[in-house]
Image: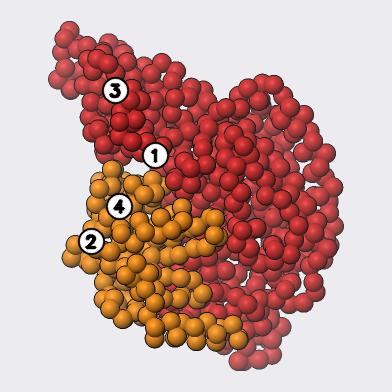
Amino acid sequence: MSDNQTTAEASEAAEDATPMIHGCPVTDSLGQEVIHATVGQYLDVVKALDDEGYTMCVDLCGVDYLDFMGRSLPDGIAAERFEVVVNLLDLSNRRRTRIRVQVPAAAPVVASLFDLYPGTEAMERECFDMFGIEFAEHPDLTRILMPEDWDGHPLRKDYEVGRIPVQFKGANA
Amino acid sequence: MSVTDDSQAGTNSDELTPTTLTGAEVAAAGIDLAVNTPDPGTNYHLFVAGTDEGAQTLKPRSQTTARELMREVGSVLRMSEAEAANLGDLPEDPEEDQTMIINMGPQHPSTHGVLRLMLELQGETVLRCKPIIGYLHTGMEKTGEQLTYMQGGTNVTRMDYLSPLNNELVFAMATEKLLGIDGDIPERAIWIRMLLSELNRMSSHLLFMATNGMDLGAVSMMIYGWREREEVLRFFQEVTGLRMNHNYIRPGGLAADLPTGWRDGVLRILDLLPPRLDEYDTLMTGQPIWRERLQGVGVITPSEALALGATGPILRSTGVEWDLRRDQPYMHYDDLDFDVVVGSYGDAFDRYAIRLAEIRESMDLVRQIVERIPQGDYRIQNKKVTPPPRARIDESMEALIHHFKIFTEGFKVPEGEVYAALESPRGELGCYIASDGGPNPYRIHMRDSSFVNIQCLPHMMRGGLVADAVAIISSVDPVLGGVDR
């Protein structure tokens, strides 16, 4: 339990000082470094981190916070409906960092990381497919998991989970 | 269009001989046979009628923009535009189109499931390749949002179905981190998790040996690989009750303790495997035909693998020493003695040899783990996440209510978001969970290594022979359940 207390204290202290990396506030999420960026800052921050040695983009995914707009974010970061979460890995220094980009629902467009990390191609397509977040300058922004003619973006919170009525043998329904 | 017509159209698209079209199709397409030249570029859609997937398919050169083409051939190589253009992908004379686009899969024995590849061939040479996925997509991440953390294990274990225990483990690790109990997991549970994780790596790599052998024509190897894997699965069945999809590793610990006699089961596998692995060496590693088929095939360099986000044996085959068990140790891997096996050429043979060596390394790890598994609890004694023991339910109303609440409502997990990662047989397996404080994950995303790794395929296949394409798919070892989720 002492570990938890120290991390909690550390994060409180961090919030007081509002540490910044490349002009973006940094928080600590359960011992993991999280950088909060706006759509405008996103590409510049990732570029700067790439120069610092984060050579691999491990993961990129979207989150739809439609039902949870009250989540805790550092001061100066306005909560938006969508987030794009990018996990970067620095192999030589064995460290990770995570960037959470606030993406407004009115214009869900962010820059593509394809030129920095070609491996994000499929991940960005998946994010587009599942959330309808568009990645500007992505070379081939098409659906990847769902059929091409599918309507809607399944992982959005306002997208209904499909249900099939259960039929019992001999039931009159 | 009837089924017969469809199949005919499919055959035609492979052979690219428009003269064999039926009269009805020609009439439907409004093409006059007399003036129709065998140019697949212009009447492409005639040939793929009934199989068109819209923008996802590999388009003929005439319909591909320069930027798309460059991405497919050059960008992943980190080439400049000029260099990429110099690859000579556009024929000298655009009128004379010498390439053809064929479709491989999704129902093809060597695509390891329902992977579909569009290949552009010039003679026997593969110029471009586009993997088309999604045939096994069932929205498991959406399903994960409907299930409690207690039920989540049954969902994630079915994603990468060849390493189910690793999937459960990473999900449990992420959940425990959110709960703040990741430091309180009993030692015995941690060691058992490591034991199962390593055995799972062995079973997965043994299956790779089988499928890799089968894909390259070493058909007896297929039987041997499945046979050895079955021995490991039999042990899993003894421990968890199921051969696959165990839901055995759960947030807070394990579903049950190891059964009596488990040690004999493990030692039996450890005794049984070494001579059989030596047999693999005789059958494959030292065999000239095997080496000829794999060496220098599907080469990828370290910088390309890093740029493409490849992890696991693919990254290690290029010589990059990166294994999360050693470099970002989780559980007690830093207490154990093992080697990270790396290759030097980044070809299909290196990836095969690494996996074979990793089976031996995992056996060594299992040996160390068996000696060190301590006595104690197999799950955390935290009433919030652990259901009461079965015997208590008969005698205590509180225990019954508690049990009922855990299995109906689940337990609430504090707000926050976390990313947990571990080294699965195929590379980094990650789990990102965002919690809103409820009993279900607000968002659960699995970073599956196969999903990222298959992006290497177009790159590895470029310029190779179509016969090597099968060897390359096999060496990437994708599991489509993980790719599509």
Amino acid under disc 3: Leu
Q: Quick one: SS at disc 3?
A: loop
Give, as a three-letter code, the residue at label 1. Arg
Instruction: Identify the colour of chain B in the image.
Output: red
Question: Which dot, 2 or 3, sits closer to the camera?
Answer: 3
> Which residue is at a point 37% across and 59% down the rendered structure image?
A48
The amino acid type, in three-letter code, at marker 4 is: Ser
Indicate which disc residue A108 carries: 2
Give the alpha-carbon distance from disc 2 to disc 3, as whole Å: 36 Å
Which quarter of the picture shows residue B369?
bottom right
Give how far across and how far down residue B60 sits, in percent: 28, 27
Q: Residues within 10 Å of mark 4 (few under 14, many from 20)?
A: many
Residues marked 4 and 2, same chain: yes
Q: Which of marks 3 and 1 is in front?
A: 1
Residues under numbered marks 3 and 1 in contact, where contact means CB atoms less than 8 Å apart: no
Q: Residue B196 carries which label?
A: none
Visual hue assigned to chain A: orange
- The kind of secondary structure element at disc 2 is loop
Q: How crowded is mark 3: few (under 14 residues within 10 Å), some or many (20 or more)?
A: some
Q: Is residue B437 above or below residue B192?
A: below
Q: Distance between the Cα atoms at labels 3 and 4? A: 27 Å
How many angstroms separate mark 4 from mark 2 (CA)? 12 Å
**Which residue, given by chain and number where applicable, does mark 1 sit on?**
B78
